[in-house]
Image (spheres, rainbow, N blue to C red):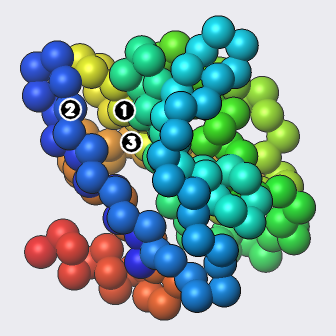
Amino acid sequence: MCTVTWLQQRDSYHLFCNRDEKKTRGAALPPAIHFRGSMRYIAPTDADHRGSWISVNEFGLSVCLLNGDHPTLGLRVPARRSRGHVVTMLATSACAGDALATLRREDLRANDPFALLLLAPDRPPVIARWNGVLLRLDPRVGEQNFLTSSSYDTAGVRQSRTV
């Protein structure tokens, strides 16, 4: 089970994240500074696919990705790209608005469903959800301060964590 929790304060935020480590997955590489163009960001690296699940850049924008719910429409396309590349693609965005614009231009059909948190100082959090068919902003973002996923029972885990 993966969980991301955040607490915003004036001029800053605290971000907490755990990643469910599958025994079949290679050990992640520790956080390191990465460069894309003139932008720096820090992120751990998934050893299997070279993406990441969390990053923060020099503007203070954090990008966090969790597995999403599968669509109920039966239109799921087999994944051809790791969702972790969404994080590294957005890691150099100057703000959540820029990250969303990039995400909306991207053809996400090659990705399994995901939930994405964009968090920056002095800005409301943004949660985008890709269900394999549609990208939507979560309108309940102000009502929560955590995201969680589970390969076992996502709905049950969410319910138990909101009590």
Q: Earlier in the sequence, mark 3 or mark 1?
A: 1
- Residue drawn at point x = 64 percent, y = 59 percent: 46
Which picture quadrant has residue 12? top left
Type of amino acid under label 2: Tyr
Where the N terminus falls, by quadrant?
A: bottom left
Q: Which mark, by number, is residue 119?
A: 1
Which picture quadrant has residue 4? bottom left
- Which percent across, then down, holds residue 59? 42, 15
Does residue 103 show up? no
Q: Secondary structure at mark 3?
A: loop
Q: Is residue 36 above or below residue 13?
A: above
- Residue drawn at point x = 53 percent, y = 32 percent: 33
Mark 3–mark 1 contact, CB under 8 Å? Answer: no
- Which percent across, then down, holds residue 18? 36, 64
Q: Which mark, by number, is residue 13?
A: 2
Crowd band around label 2 with a 10 angstrom C-alpha radius: few (<14), some (14–19), many (20+): some
- Residue drawn at point x = 11 percent, y = 28 percent: 9
Mark 2–mark 1 contact, CB under 8 Å? Answer: yes
Q: Which mark, by number, is residue 92?
A: none
**Residue of label 3:** 139
